[in-house]
Structure formats: C-alpha cells, structure tokens
Image (spheres, rainbow, N blue to C red):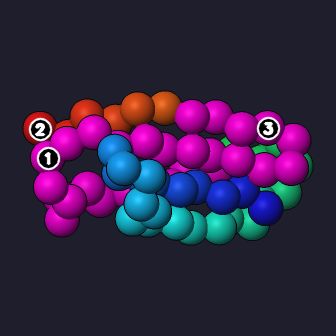
Amino acid sequence: MITVCLTNIIGEVIYRIQITAAANQKQVQSIDLSGFQDGIYFMEVSSKDFKYLDKIIKQ
C-alpha cells in the first residue's frame, strides 16, 4: 500500500490517495492541481518501507 498525501503550507491535508501495488510494480498517479490556488504544497509518498517528501510550487 502506497499513500500519496498533498498538504498546503500550513500543514492541512488537501489531497490523499492510497494505492495498492505489488512489489517491484511500476505505478503512475497523476494529481490535477488546476483547482488549487497558487502557492507552495508538500507531497509525501510513503509506504511501510520508504518515505519521499518533495515541495511543489504552483504558479
């Protein structure tokens, strides 16, 4: 199970999805940001084995 979570600059969760994927299976997920205001967001992708955090700037 992989969780993708998008938060705004003050830490509010504005998008969350859980994806079931088999081990070593490539997974692609698109997030449409057109409905969100311009600003800074943080995306966290995590599972029981890893965690990845990145900053997104929408202009």
- Whichever of labels 2 and 3 marks the residue nearer the N terminus, that label is 3
Q: Quadrant of the N terminus?
A: bottom right
Element class at badge 1: loop
Residue at x 72%, y 38% (from the top left corner): 51
In this figure, which residue is indicated by the disc labeled 2? Answer: 59
- Whichever of labels 1 and 3 marks the residue nearer the N terminus, that label is 1
Foreground residue, 42 or 18? 42
Residue at x 40%, y 32% (from the top left corner): 55
Magenta-colored stretch includes residue 32: yes
Along the horizontal axis of the image, is 15 left or right of 58?
right
Q: Quadrant of the C terminus?
A: top left
Residue at x 65%, y 67% (from the top left corner): 18
Tag 2: amino acid:
Gln
Q: Which disc, if any, is residue 38? A: 1
Q: Quadrant of residue 52?
A: top right
In this figure, which residue is indicated by the disc labeled 3? Answer: 50
Along the horizontal axis of the image, is 49 left or right of 15?
right
Q: Is residue 50 visible?
A: yes
Pointer 2 and pointer 1: residues touching (CB < 8 Å)?
A: yes
Foreground residue, 47 or 8? 8
The span shown in magenta is 27-53
Q: Is residue 33 above or below residue 16?
A: above
